[in-house]
Image (spheres, rainbow, N blue to C red):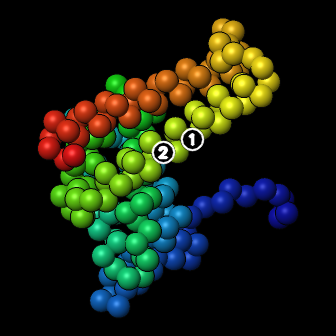
Amino acid sequence: SASGWKPKRKTQEQVANIVTESGEEILPPSEAEKQAKSLLNKLTAENYPTVSAKLINLLNQSKFKEDKFKSVPLLVSMTIFKGCDEPHWGMIYARLLGDFMKTISADVVPFFIEDYKKKRQQERWDLEDEAEENGTPINVEMMSDEYYKVVGEKRRFLGMLKIIGYLYNINAL
């Protein structure tokens, strides 16, 4: 029928690339985020050279003033989050962060790691404060929502430690 549901397809008109003064096209922030998520999900040891090159091309958008320096924080924070959430792939994400540091200023990645650590520590303190207000210890029973929240927090903390260790090994920190 004419008024029925139709799938939303991306057309050239819907995704308008930003044209820089030099005539190059860069992706808008929403498209850059989608593409970065997709590429980070595809990142493995076997296809590291091709995927990392595409991610670095996305990162290089930041050199254009039309990007307003949005690509760097987006890609670095997404990579740190992904590496912390998947500790068994920490070495690959740390290697990617090291490549980012070679492409951009070397001070940027440690800044985002510190920012990530501060956010996680604040979440942990909020959880502890909430437990103190309720008068209940942080010990949670198995298979509850709180249990999975605590386990996820521990996994992300382990991932963060692994990334920091790998970055230290490649002399990035």
Between 88 and 35, the residue placed more toward the observer is: 88
Residue occupied by mark 2: 118
Q: Residue at x 42, y 60 (%)?
A: 73
Q: Is residue 108 left or right of residue 80?
A: left
Tell me the amino acid under the disc marked 1. Gln
The picture quadrant where one finds residue 170 is: top left
Q: Residues within 10 Å of mark 1 (few under 14, many from 20)?
A: few
110 over 170 or under it: above or below = below
Residue occupied by mark 1: 122
Between 75 and 1, the residue placed more toward the observer is: 75
Q: Position of residue 113 (x, y in %)?
A: 37, 47
Q: Quadrant of the N terminus?
A: bottom right
Q: Position of residue 168 (x, y in %)?
A: 20, 39
Q: Position of residue 135 (x, y in %)?
A: 78, 20
Q: Is residue 3 left or right of residue 80?
A: right
- Mark yes or no: residue 164 visible: yes
Return the residue found at the far top. 142
Q: Residue at x 52, y 39 (%)?
A: 120
Return the residue found at the far bottom. 21
Helix, strand, or loop for circle 2? Answer: helix
Helix, strand, or loop for circle 1? Answer: helix
- Kindly report the distance in space between the C-alpha atoms of the residues bearing marks 2 and 1: 6 Å
62 over 73 or under it: above or below = below
Labels 2 and 1 touching (C-beta < 8 A): yes
Q: Residue at x 48, y 45 (%)?
A: 118
